[in-house]
Image (cartoon, rainbow, N blue to C red):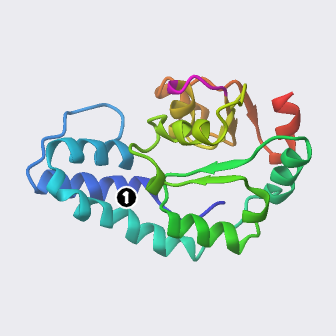
Amino acid sequence: MDSPLDLRAVGREMETLLRARGVSLPARELRWSGAELLAVGRREAPTLETEVMAIPVAHERRAMEAAVLIPHAVEAVAAMRALGYATAIWTNNDRVVADFVLARFGLLAHLDLVVTRDDVVQLKPDPDGLRVVRARWPEASHIVVVGDSWVDGAAAQAGGVPFIAYRADHAELARRGVTATASISSLLDLPAALA
Protein backbone atom coordinates (compact mmCIF):
# COMPACT_ATOMS: atom_id res chain seq x y z
CA MET A 1 0.00 0.00 0.00
CA ASP A 2 0.98 3.57 -0.51
CA SER A 3 -0.27 6.18 1.91
CA PRO A 4 0.45 9.78 2.84
CA LEU A 5 2.15 8.58 6.03
CA ASP A 6 5.18 10.84 6.39
CA LEU A 7 7.71 8.75 8.30
CA ARG A 8 10.17 11.63 8.43
CA ALA A 9 7.58 13.83 10.13
CA VAL A 10 6.81 11.02 12.57
CA GLY A 11 10.51 10.68 13.38
CA ARG A 12 10.98 14.44 13.78
CA GLU A 13 8.04 14.65 16.21
CA MET A 14 9.27 11.67 18.20
CA GLU A 15 12.79 13.11 18.33
CA THR A 16 11.47 16.51 19.44
CA LEU A 17 9.39 14.91 22.19
CA LEU A 18 12.27 12.78 23.49
CA ARG A 19 14.68 15.72 23.52
CA ALA A 20 12.07 17.94 25.23
CA ARG A 21 11.70 15.29 27.95
CA GLY A 22 15.44 15.24 28.55
CA VAL A 23 16.48 12.18 26.56
CA SER A 24 19.94 12.67 25.12
CA LEU A 25 20.16 11.43 21.55
CA PRO A 26 23.64 10.98 20.11
CA ALA A 27 24.52 13.17 17.14
CA ARG A 28 24.49 11.25 13.87
CA GLU A 29 24.73 11.90 10.16
CA LEU A 30 21.68 9.83 9.16
CA ARG A 31 18.19 10.74 10.31
CA TRP A 32 16.64 8.74 13.12
CA SER A 33 13.85 6.36 12.16
CA GLY A 34 10.78 6.11 14.37
CA ALA A 35 11.74 2.55 15.32
CA GLU A 36 15.23 3.64 16.34
CA LEU A 37 13.82 6.50 18.42
CA LEU A 38 11.35 4.15 20.08
CA ALA A 39 14.21 1.79 20.98
CA VAL A 40 16.23 4.65 22.50
CA GLY A 41 13.17 5.88 24.38
CA ARG A 42 12.44 2.40 25.76
CA ARG A 43 16.01 2.12 26.96
CA GLU A 44 16.54 5.66 28.28
CA ALA A 45 13.05 6.73 29.39
CA PRO A 46 10.62 3.78 29.45
CA THR A 47 7.93 5.84 31.18
CA LEU A 48 7.61 7.92 27.99
CA GLU A 49 6.72 4.98 25.73
CA THR A 50 2.96 5.62 25.68
CA GLU A 51 3.47 9.30 24.88
CA VAL A 52 6.10 8.56 22.22
CA MET A 53 3.94 5.87 20.57
CA ALA A 54 0.95 8.22 20.41
CA ILE A 55 2.79 10.12 17.66
CA PRO A 56 3.01 7.32 15.07
CA VAL A 57 -0.44 6.05 16.03
CA ALA A 58 -2.01 9.46 15.29
CA HIS A 59 -0.18 9.72 11.95
CA GLU A 60 -1.09 6.15 10.97
CA ARG A 61 -4.78 6.58 11.77
CA ARG A 62 -4.95 9.66 9.54
CA ALA A 63 -2.97 8.02 6.74
CA MET A 64 -4.88 4.72 6.66
CA GLU A 65 -7.99 6.43 5.35
CA ALA A 66 -6.08 7.76 2.34
CA ALA A 67 -4.08 4.59 1.57
CA VAL A 68 -4.11 3.35 -2.01
CA LEU A 69 -3.28 -0.07 -3.33
CA ILE A 70 0.07 -0.49 -5.05
CA PRO A 71 -0.45 -1.57 -8.67
CA HIS A 72 -0.63 -5.35 -9.07
CA ALA A 73 -0.41 -6.09 -5.31
CA VAL A 74 -3.35 -8.50 -5.27
CA GLU A 75 -2.20 -10.21 -8.46
CA ALA A 76 1.35 -10.60 -7.15
CA VAL A 77 0.32 -12.07 -3.80
CA ALA A 78 -2.21 -14.38 -5.47
CA ALA A 79 0.48 -15.50 -7.95
CA MET A 80 2.90 -16.25 -5.12
CA ARG A 81 0.35 -18.46 -3.41
CA ALA A 82 -0.48 -20.17 -6.71
CA LEU A 83 3.23 -20.94 -7.10
CA GLY A 84 3.22 -22.58 -3.67
CA TYR A 85 4.75 -19.80 -1.60
CA ALA A 86 3.42 -18.92 1.83
CA THR A 87 2.67 -15.20 2.01
CA ALA A 88 3.06 -12.76 4.87
CA ILE A 89 2.97 -9.04 5.46
CA TRP A 90 5.40 -7.64 8.05
CA THR A 91 4.77 -4.03 8.96
CA ASN A 92 5.83 -1.55 11.62
CA ASN A 93 2.20 -0.36 11.70
CA ASP A 94 -0.12 -1.63 14.40
CA ARG A 95 -2.79 -4.31 14.02
CA VAL A 96 -5.65 -1.82 13.70
CA VAL A 97 -4.08 -0.08 10.71
CA ALA A 98 -2.86 -3.28 9.05
CA ASP A 99 -6.18 -5.10 9.32
CA PHE A 100 -8.16 -2.05 8.17
CA VAL A 101 -6.05 -1.46 5.07
CA LEU A 102 -5.57 -5.11 4.11
CA ALA A 103 -9.31 -5.83 4.47
CA ARG A 104 -10.23 -2.69 2.55
CA PHE A 105 -8.22 -3.86 -0.46
CA GLY A 106 -9.13 -7.54 -0.25
CA LEU A 107 -5.61 -8.71 0.56
CA LEU A 108 -6.35 -10.62 3.78
CA ALA A 109 -7.74 -13.55 1.79
CA HIS A 110 -4.40 -13.91 0.01
CA LEU A 111 -2.17 -13.80 3.10
CA ASP A 112 -1.14 -16.60 5.40
CA LEU A 113 0.26 -14.32 8.11
CA VAL A 114 0.20 -10.65 9.09
CA VAL A 115 2.95 -9.48 11.45
CA THR A 116 2.46 -6.03 12.99
CA ARG A 117 4.27 -4.07 15.68
CA ASP A 118 1.86 -5.67 18.16
CA ASP A 119 3.54 -9.03 17.45
CA VAL A 120 7.20 -8.05 17.85
CA VAL A 121 9.52 -6.89 20.59
CA GLN A 122 11.54 -4.60 18.29
CA LEU A 123 10.51 -2.86 15.07
CA LYS A 124 12.31 -2.94 11.73
CA PRO A 125 15.20 -2.37 11.09
CA ASP A 126 15.49 -5.01 13.83
CA PRO A 127 14.82 -8.49 12.37
CA ASP A 128 12.46 -9.56 15.19
CA GLY A 129 9.55 -9.97 12.76
CA LEU A 130 11.46 -12.83 11.18
CA ARG A 131 11.23 -14.63 14.53
CA VAL A 132 7.44 -14.53 14.20
CA VAL A 133 7.61 -15.75 10.60
CA ARG A 134 9.98 -18.58 11.50
CA ALA A 135 7.75 -19.60 14.40
CA ARG A 136 4.84 -19.93 11.97
CA TRP A 137 6.89 -21.91 9.42
CA PRO A 138 9.76 -23.58 11.30
CA GLU A 139 10.31 -25.97 8.39
CA ALA A 140 10.73 -23.19 5.80
CA SER A 141 14.04 -23.55 4.02
CA HIS A 142 13.89 -20.07 2.44
CA ILE A 143 12.44 -16.75 3.52
CA VAL A 144 12.65 -13.65 1.35
CA VAL A 145 11.76 -10.10 2.34
CA VAL A 146 10.28 -7.81 -0.32
CA GLY A 147 10.16 -4.17 0.69
CA ASP A 148 10.34 -0.58 -0.42
CA SER A 149 12.47 1.00 2.28
CA TRP A 150 15.85 0.74 3.92
CA VAL A 151 14.33 -0.58 7.16
CA ASP A 152 12.96 -3.58 5.26
CA GLY A 153 16.36 -4.30 3.75
CA ALA A 154 18.23 -3.76 6.99
CA ALA A 155 15.87 -6.11 8.83
CA ALA A 156 16.27 -8.77 6.13
CA GLN A 157 20.04 -8.37 6.17
CA ALA A 158 20.23 -8.55 9.97
CA GLY A 159 18.03 -11.64 9.87
CA GLY A 160 20.18 -13.34 7.25
CA VAL A 161 17.58 -13.51 4.48
CA PRO A 162 17.56 -12.11 0.93
CA PHE A 163 16.00 -8.70 0.28
CA ILE A 164 14.15 -7.80 -2.91
CA ALA A 165 13.91 -4.02 -3.22
CA TYR A 166 10.63 -2.81 -4.70
CA ARG A 167 10.87 0.75 -6.06
CA ALA A 168 13.33 1.52 -3.26
CA ASP A 169 15.54 4.57 -2.92
CA HIS A 170 18.86 2.96 -3.83
CA ALA A 171 20.88 5.94 -2.60
CA GLU A 172 19.27 5.57 0.84
CA LEU A 173 19.88 1.81 0.79
CA ALA A 174 23.56 2.50 0.09
CA ARG A 175 23.78 5.15 2.85
CA ARG A 176 22.35 2.61 5.28
CA GLY A 177 24.62 -0.20 4.12
CA VAL A 178 21.77 -2.28 2.73
CA THR A 179 22.39 -4.57 -0.22
CA ALA A 180 19.44 -5.84 -2.24
CA THR A 181 19.56 -9.32 -3.71
CA ALA A 182 17.31 -8.12 -6.52
CA SER A 183 15.46 -4.95 -7.47
CA ILE A 184 12.04 -4.72 -9.10
CA SER A 185 9.94 -1.81 -10.30
CA SER A 186 6.68 -3.75 -10.64
CA LEU A 187 5.21 -6.40 -8.37
CA LEU A 188 4.50 -8.37 -11.54
CA ASP A 189 8.28 -8.95 -11.68
CA LEU A 190 8.31 -10.68 -8.30
CA PRO A 191 8.02 -14.31 -9.53
CA ALA A 192 10.99 -13.83 -11.84
CA ALA A 193 13.02 -12.16 -9.07
CA LEU A 194 12.35 -15.13 -6.78
CA ALA A 195 13.46 -17.59 -9.45
Tell me the quarter of the image containing the C terminus.
top right
> As drawn, which residue projects farthest toward the left?
22
Residue 33 visible: no
Seen in the image, is 167 located left or right of residue 19? right
Magenta-colored segment: predominant secondary structure? loop
Q: Position of residue 79 (x, y in %)?
A: 89, 48
Q: Which residue is mark 1?
A: 10
Does residue 111 lie above or below 143 as drawn? below
Q: Position of residue 72 (x, y in %)?
A: 83, 56
In the image, what residue occupies the spot 15% across and 56% down? 47
- Residue 9 image point, x, y percent: 38, 58
Q: Is residue 160 magenta?
A: yes
Residue beneath the point at 60% across and 35% down: 134
Secondary structure type for disc 1: helix
Q: Is residue 51 visible?
A: yes
Q: Residue at x 91, y 41 (%)?
A: 83
119 left or right of 185?
left
Quarter of the image holding residue 80? top right
Assess disc 1: are there few (<14), some (14-19) or many (≥20) residues with their C-alpha within 10 Å of its C-alpha.
many
Residue segment shown in magenta:
158-162
Please tell me which residue lies in front, 55 or 102.
102
Residue 154: give x, y in percent of width and height: 51, 31
Residue in the image at 35% along x and 40% along y: 31
Look at the image and tell me in which quarter the N terminus lies.
bottom right
Determine the image quadrant of residue 101. Answer: bottom right
On screen, residue 63 above or below 26: below
Q: Is residue 63 left or right of residue 32?
A: right
Residues 85 and 175: in front is 85
Q: Would you identify the image quadrant in which residue 114 lies? A: bottom right
**Residue 189 magenta-drawn?**
no
Q: Nearer the viewer, residue 16 or 161?
A: 161
Q: Amino acid at mark 1?
A: Val
